[in-house]
Amino acid sequence: MKIQGEHYHTIWVDADDPRIIQVIDQRKLPFVFETFAMRSADDAFFAVKEMVVRGAPLIGVTAAYGMYLALRQLQNESWEEDLIGVADYLKSSRPTAVNLAFAVDEMLAFMLANKDDAELIAKVLAKAGELKQQEIEFGDKIGEYGLELIEEIYEKKGSTVNILTHCNAGWLACIDWGTATAPIYKAHLKGIPVHVWVDETRPRNQGARLTAYELGEQGVPHTVIPDNAGGHLMQHDMVDMVIVGSDRTTVTGDVANKIGTYLKALAAHDNNVPFYVALPSSTFDWDMNDGVKDIPIEQRAGDEVAEIEGWHDEQIKTVRLIPEKSSVANYGFDVTPARLVSGLISERGICKADKQSILKLYPEKINR
Ligand code: MRU
C-alpha cells in the first residue's frame, strides 16, 4: 500500500544485503517513518516482542525470516538441534497470534526436509518469501469476498456505507491490503462511498495511530472514536457493519482479537449490526474447539496502560496517566464466541462461524 505516494510492504529483504531483513518500525508511526533492520533471530524476537512489527500475519512472516536469519548464523555441526531451539524461542515472543507458530513450524519443517541441500540458505529465503507472498494473496482475496458484503449494503442503502473497525487489521498488520481493511480498500478503489469509524484501541492506540494513518494515506474517509463510542453509534444506526481481524480463530469459530472486540460484538448483536471477522487461513487454530477456555491471552506490561505516548515538540513523548499508587492490568486480547459472529471472511470465501461451515471451506483440514 502507499505511504506518501510510494508503494510499500511491511517487510522486505534489504536490496543491498540479503543478510538483512527490513521492517517498518511501527512503534513510531504515524509521527516518524523509520525502518528497523533485522540481522538475527534475536532481532526478529525483539521486533515481535516489543511490537516493532505487530498484527498476526506480519508477526508470522517476521518469525519466518527470523528462522532464515538463524540458519545463516548456525552453520555448525548441531545446527538442526539449535534450530529447533530457535523455533521455540521465536514462538515464545508473543502467545496469542497463532500465525507465529504456523510460520515457524512451516519454516522448520522445510529446513529439516531439505537439510542436505547445498542451496539450503537460498531456498529457505525463498520459502520465507513464499509465506510473505501467500499473505499478500490472502489479503487480496479477502478483499474481493468482503467487497461483495459492502456492495450489498450499498445497493440497499444507496449512500455511504459506514464501517466500524477495532485495532489495526490493515496492511500494516499484514504485508499488503490487510484483512479487515482489504474489503474497504477494494470498495474505495471501486468508487463505492465508504466511511470508517476507527476505534482508538487503548492502551497502545493501534486504531488511532495505525489504522487512521493507513486509511488517510489511501484517501479513505474515516473518523477516530473512543473505544466506548461504538455502542452508541450502533444504537443510532450510524454503523452499517463491523469488520475486525483476528489473532487466532478456533475451528469452531471462536475469535480472539484485540481487547475490546468482544464488547463491540455484544453491541453489534444487541443492535442487529452485522459483525464480520476477516482472517487468512494462517490464523485458524485447527486443533482448538473452545476459544474462551483455551486461547492464551497475552498480558503485557502495566506501563502501556499507566502511560500514553504522543507527539510533542517534534518528538514522541510519554506521559503518565494514572496515580503512582494505582495498580493496573493489561490484557491484550479477548475472545468473541462464535455465536456473536455474523460471518468469517477468508481467502476462500465467506462462511458461518461454525465447524461444519469452516471445514466445508477447508476440507483438507477434516482428518488432519
Ligand atoms: O497487539 P497487536 O497490535 O499485534 O494486535 C493486533 C490485532 O489484534 C489485529 O486485529 C490482528 O492481529 C489481526 S491483524 C490482520
Image (cartoon, rainbow, N blue to C red):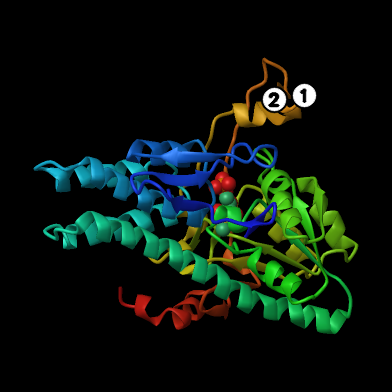
Q: Is residue 293 left or right of residue 177?
A: left
Q: Is mark 1 within 8 Å of ligand 1?
A: no
Decide which of 157, 229 is in the foreground and name it: 157
- Which residue is drawn at the image coordinates 62% and 78% (left, top)? 145
Q: Examine the image and state in which quarter residue 351 appears.
A: bottom right
Question: Label 2 is placed on what type of residue?
Answer: Lys
**Residue 265 picture location, percent across and down:** 69, 60
Q: How many marks?
A: 2
Above/below status of 244 relative to 353? above
Q: Amino acid at mark 1?
A: Asp
Q: Are marks 2 and 1 in contact (CB under 8 Å)?
A: yes
User: 330 above or below 200?
Assistant: above
Considering every residue shown, the one lying at the far front of the view is 16
Foreground tag (2 vs 1): 1
Seen in the picture, residue 46 relative to 104 is either above or below; the reply is above
Image quadrant in which the N terminus is located: bottom right
Q: State the residue lying farthest toward the top.
A: 325
Name the secondary structure under disc 2.
strand
Disc 2 to disc 1, C-alpha distance: 9 Å
In the rendered view, does 52 fall on the left or right side of 214?
Answer: left
Res 333 visible: no
Instruction: From the image, tell me which residue sits under label 1.
Output: 313
The residue indicated by pointer 2 is 317
**Which mark is drawn over residue 130?**
none
Q: Residue at x 29, y 47 (%)?
A: 87
Q: Element under label 1?
A: loop
Q: Is residue 9 above or below residue 45?
A: below
Residue found at x 33% / y 39%:
40
Q: Alpha-carbon neighbours of circle 1 within 10 Å: few (<14), some, or many (≥20)?
A: few
Asked whether residue 2 appears in the rendered view, the answer is: yes
Q: Nearer the viewer, residue 282 or 42?
A: 42
